[in-house]
Image: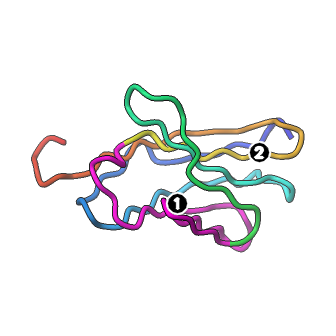
């Protein structure tokens, strides 16, 4: 489906070593669409984080919580650090290779004003 769309907040902030929950809405998802998360660190190319189809998934970097109706998901960074500051992309991918993507930028709050 070429009309799969995702929406995410423009930015998120948190304290270091605390969990960060990055939401993604994908109300037009089809049954065959996988939910993929990538991140792009400053001056780097995109990097795979995690993906899932219908059930929650965990790996060493993060957890992916998928709503029962699949219309939303949340990427959880369990103990975010300054090194996790990046643009995070939630992307829907079906077997035909068409995508819908939206970025969210995560900026950790390191206890300093103006970050």
The question of residue 6 being in magenta is answered with no
Q: Secondary structure at mark 2?
A: strand
Tell me the residue at 71%/74% (across/down).
68
Q: Residue furthest top?
A: 43
**In the rendered image, which residue does mark 1 sit on?**
75
Q: Position of residue 30 (x, y in %)?
A: 83, 54
Q: Is residue 45 above or below residue 105?
A: above
Which residue: 81% across, 36% down? 98
Residue 64 placement: quadrant: bottom right
Percent across and percent down for residue 79 are 34, 65
Q: CA distance from mark 1 to mark 2?
A: 16 Å
Specify the quadrant that holds the C terminus.
top left
SS for dot 1: strand
- Which badge, 1 or 2, is on the more N-terminal residue? 1
Of the pair 25 and 103, the residue shown nearer to us: 103
Q: Residues within 10 Å of mark 2 (few under 14, many from 20)?
A: many
Work out whether residue 82 or residue 109 is closer to the camera in this orientation and state it. Answer: 82
Label 2 sits on residue: 93
Tell me, yes or no, whether the highlighted magenta stretch contains residue 65: yes
Relative depth, front residue between 105 and 44: 44
Q: Return the residue nearer the eye: 51 or 7.
A: 51
Which region is colored magenta?
56-85
Reply above or below: 50 against 83.
Answer: below
Mark carried by residue 25? none
The extreme right residue here reads 96
Which residue is located at x 57 percent, y 54 percent? 24
Q: Tell me where residue 6 appears, x and y as whole percent.
A: 64, 46
Q: Residues within 10 Å of mark 1 (few under 14, many from 20)?
A: many
Where 51 sits versus 10, above or below? below
In the rendered structure, the answer to whether residue 81 lies left or right of residue 38 reads left
Q: Quadrant of the N terminus?
A: top right
């Amino acid at each position: 489906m070429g009309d799969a769309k995702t929406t995410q907040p423009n930015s998120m902030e948190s304290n270091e070593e605390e969990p960060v929950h990055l939401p993604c809405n994908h109300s037009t998802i089809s049954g065959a669409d996988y939910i993929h998360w990538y991140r792009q660190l400053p001056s780097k190319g995109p990097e795979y984080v995690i993906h899932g189809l219908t059930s929650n998934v965990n790996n060493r970097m993060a957890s992916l919580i998928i709503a029962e109706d699949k219309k939303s998901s949340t990427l959880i960074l369990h103990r975010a650090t300054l090194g996790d500051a990046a643009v995070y992309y939630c992307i829907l991918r079906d077997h035909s290779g068409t995508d819908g993507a939206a970025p969210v930028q995560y900026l950790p709050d390191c206890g300093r004003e103006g970050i």
